[in-house]
Image (cartoon, helix red, strand yellow):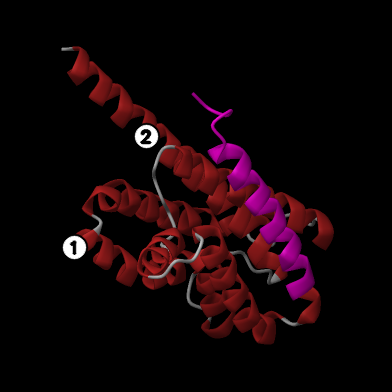
Amino acid sequence: MNNFLYRVRTIFTRAIVIFCGSLLIGLGLNGFIAPHHLLDGGLIGLGLVIYYMIGLPIGISILLVNIPVFIYAFFYHRKHFFYGSIGLLFSFFMTEKLNVIGGNMEIPLLFSSIIGGVLTGMGIGLMLRYEVSSDGLDLIALIISAKWPINIGLVIFLLDSLIMLIGLHIVGFTAFCYSMIVIMMSSFMIITFTSKKWIP
């Protein structure tokens, strides 16, 4: 009975976390990052690059670049697939639903960079705290670090850097510099939320 109640509580907690995390990501992307053509880390950043290049909606772009990773997870990392795919789908849904706020908030570029990074970092970090991922980059990093003796943090940094370099030619140097602020704030919030001292 106790085991059943624990599982119910775990599922309920993760459902709330997925909803709140997806909401924060959607707000950060649509309200502060995309209106200024800024970038973020991970496959979210790659999805933003696609959005800026061809105008495909942000949520759909992020969903498409994540699908191959989650297909791989289904066959080889099944324990991360279930909640990860739910996190991805909810993030897609929230990002699409909140695109109506894009460009409606007249906030200076610097503050948008900070707030956008904080919100997306909080959303991603909150979900990662409960072993839910909305972005396939961490799984890619795990795969690479498992095959070669490379620190997973270094792998994520290198992949983020590659995405940023791709985006540099799309968004321009000024937006690229402010995007670094987005990534720094996002990374800080992810580290904070995944720290063992936070969130029981």
Asked which quadrant contains residue 135, the reply is bottom left
Disc 2 marks a residue whose amino acid type is Arg
Q: Position of residue 32 (x, y in %)?
A: 69, 57
Residue 45 shows in the view: yes
* Residue 180 is a magenta residue: yes
Q: Quadrant of the N terminus?
A: top left
**What's the magenta bit mostly, secondary-structure-wise?**
helix
- Seen as rendered, the residue at the extreme left is 1
Task: For mark 2, give the secondary structure.
Answer: helix
For this rendering, which residue is in front, 90 or 186?
186
Contact, CB < 8 Å: mark 2 with mark 1? no
Name which residue lies at 57% across and 38% down: 193
On the picture, is 4 further left or further right than 22?
left
- Seen as rendered, the residue at the extreme front is 149
Name which residue lies at 75% across and 53% down: 114
Residue 195 drawn above or below residue 84: above
Name which residue lies at 58% across and 78% down: 162
On residue 75, the disc is: 1
Task: For mark 1, give the secondary structure.
Answer: helix
Residue matched to label 2: 14
Q: Residues within 10 Å of mark 1 (few under 14, many from 20)?
A: few
Residue 108 shows in the view: no
Q: Position of residue 191 (x, y in %)?
A: 61, 45
For this rendering, which residue is in front, 156 or 146?
146
* Residue 175 is a magenta residue: no
Q: Residues within 10 Å of mark 2 (few under 14, many from 20)?
A: many
For this rendering, which residue is in front, 197 or 82?
197
Residue 174 drawn above or below residue 110: below
Mark-to-mark CA distance, 2 and 1: 23 Å
Q: Magenta region: which residues?
A: 176-200
Q: Nearer the viewer, mark 2 or mark 1?
A: 1
Name which residue lies at 68% across and 66% down: 35
